Amino acid sequence: MTQVLFGQSYYLRFDPKLYAAMQPYPPLGTLYAASYLRARGYAVALFDAMLAASESEWVHALDRHAPQFAVLYEDSFNYLSKMCLMRMREAAFAMMSTAKERGCTVIVSGSDATAHLQEYFEHGADYILIGEGEITLGELMDTLTARAPRTLSNIRGLAYREPDGTIHQTPPREFIRDLDALPFPAWELVDMPRYERAWRGAHGYFSMNLVTTRGCPYHCNWCAKPIYGQRYNVRSPENVVAEMKLLKEKFHPDHVEFADDIFGLKPGWIARFADLACVHDAQIPFKCLLRADLVKDETVAALQRAGCRTVWMGAESGSQKILDAMDKGTRVEQIYAATARLHRAGIQVGFFLQCGYRGENRGDIDKTLQMVRDCRPDDIGVSVSYPLPGTKFYDQVRRELGPKQNWIDSDDLAMMYRGTYSTEFYRVLYRAVHAEFRLRRAAAELARVAHRPREWRVRHLRLLATIPLHATRLAWMRWKMNTLAKEERETNPTALAHNHG
């Protein structure tokens, strides 16, 4: 008998851009919570929305398992869950409603619920976990099942409604310092063959996800941290390598994504991890996220030894003015130096770029484009500045926000405050940056094999055929951007002057 059915509301199918990219990962945060409750003796099951077709599959899971408790435990390691997309909020509301109809007690944990307590309670939540949720969930379950009852007001990190409808929020819970004490995620609850088929069908290899840390100590002022705040705790290299070896022997992934905000921040951690991975034959090619200022020669050497394939950096902008405005704490020259170090070691580099930050002008945008041309990253991810509650950036633009304060999906790219340019401009810029990136990458690959006829493959002919298309699109997009910018200057000169100032 299932006591607790876990789920989360990020449906890949509801995010067209990322559904087309087809790089799905199981919900790590949900799996940690499920394994924690199971270790306390509760019978748990998992509904995994990531590859589900719709909320109807949740309904089937409710009917099949008939749980007493439905726990929507959002994956806090998935940055898309942190973005609080409207389509996923609608899914969460629908899931809570159907669970309530079946008599379940509904418990919710996640960034969006934390920021919108009233709305989640109105749509069926009985309890909302605030911050890191495993221990709070355990104490709440022990209380609700009378295993070890305590008054709700004595459970830290909890929000609930009083009989008169007012929302009561208890004091924050201390963060878990010893992450090694947590059981590994409940991997066996996942339909792993379904994930493997999705990955191999789309990309020819199978990737899994891991996390070695919780939190981030840096102060980028647009980054929402409703779950872990500024704290940073890390698993030991020994613990991580033990889980990698388990996954390697049980599921045979070809690749791993480390979903940490920052990988290996603790001094000496990456070197120790690399040594242990080699000793225990636990190496799996992986990608991770690092800050540019942390990419030193010794770090790169350790990453190379550990089997790192790709490092993503939150480059954000090629303009130092914008990096400083973001409180990023990095310098443009560090991005250039880090990219060069990683490329010399044969490690690929990805750039996360952010357009539309407050005060950004065409000169700043041009510096970002030039940085991409100069550094030649192997991949890029482009977004538009997104104000989330609880951030300094949100407070700066709060008065400019209209009724729409969340994107529908990750391809929305709407400007939700008064930026330098319009939403249409930034959507065209998004496409232009990608078109130029693909054009330059195709040209570089063709130049590499131009005098090596034996290396030519069918894909090179396809690349050659795409160049005129990319070039035509890029020319049109640049014209469109210039036209939109000119219109903005003519219709809104005051705001433009303010943002250029």
Image (spheres, rainbow, N blue to C red):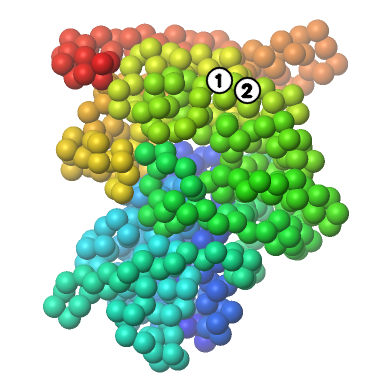
- The x, y position of residue 194, in whole percent, is 62, 58
Q: Residue 412 bears which disc, if any?
A: none
Is 234 left, or right, of 158 in this rendering?
Answer: right
Residue occupying image coordinates x 39% and y 24%: 322
Describe residue 50's horizontal placement relative to residue 252 as left or right.
Answer: left
* Farthest-out residue, left: 164
Q: Is residue 308 left or right of residue 173?
A: right
Q: Name the residue carrying label 2.
A: 337
Q: Type of residue at label 2?
A: Ala
Mark 2 nearby-residue class (10 Å; few <14, some 14–19, many ≥20)? some
Q: Nearer the viewer, residue 362 or 68?
A: 362
Residue appearing at x 51%, y 25% in the figure: 331
What's the amino acid at mark 1?
Glu
**Mark 1 = which residue?**
333
Quarter-of-image position of residue 467: top right
Mark count = 2
Confirm or deny contact between disc 1 and disc 2 (CB under 8 A): yes
